[in-house]
Image: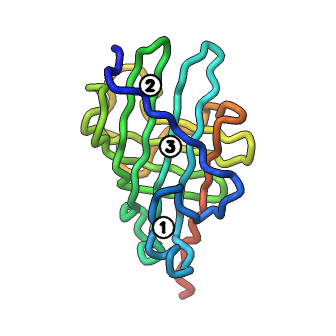
Amino acid sequence: MRDPRPRRRFVAQDSHRSRTAPARGRTAPPAARHGEREAAALTGTAKLYRPAGDDITFSFDAHLAAKDNKDPQAATGTFRFSHYKDGEGGYAVAKVDCLTTGGPVAVVTGVVIETDVDGFRNKRVGVSVHDDGRRDRLGYSWITKGDYQELPPCMSAAPFEKVKAGTGDFRVLPWKLEYPTE
């Protein structure tokens, strides 16, 4: 299927920016504007490595506010993914419904709100990211063949794909879950 709209170009964010800084042209989350660290975040854009020349891009702008530290399903934002080869393919945009992070790993889920691929329409999808500096990795819930049951929030496959060198970077802000002391 050929997308009749002009292809949008993704611009990788500057790797020297603060891990809590918003993408250019976006407003910082309220906590970041007031100097308070947000509870967790997954941001950035990069392409996956594919030796056959597929153009597969993922872009994240997912945040968990400090006030929602104990509720990862209160996360906000969107993520986008696309896959094109030889002028054919598709894209999807998902509204975040859960974000968890631990160290350099994040799992985000969301319900697809915009797509040109019928199989994704109104479905929950999950993506995992391992933020390993210049060797980031990514995984996604739709790796299995055939139909699958509805994906629960906060779930995805392990980060098995490699990011193509020089195409961008993902940034994970680790979640600092506060445990009860009594």
Q: Quadrant of residue 29?
A: bottom left
Instruction: Provide the residue designation for mark 2.
Output: 144
In the image, 128 versus 61, the foreground residue is: 61
Relative height, residue 16 to residue 134 (above, below): below
88 on left or right of 103:
left
| Distance (Cα) linking label 2 and label 3 | 22 Å
Q: Quadrant of the C terminus?
A: bottom right
- The extreme right residue here reads 134
Residue 91 % position (x, y): 39, 30
**Label 3 near label 1: C-beta < 8 Å?**
no
Residue 2 % position (x, y): 35, 15
Residue 90 % position (x, y): 38, 25
- The extreme bottom residue here reads 182
Relative height, residue 66 to residue 109 (above, below): below
* Amino acid at pointer 1: Ala
In the image, 59 versus 4, the foreground residue is: 4
Q: Quadrant of the N terminus?
A: top left
In the image, 180 versus 30, the foreground residue is: 30
Instruction: Provide the residue designation for mark 1.
Output: 28
First reached walking from the N terminus: tag 1 or tag 3? 1
* Element on which disc 1 rests: loop
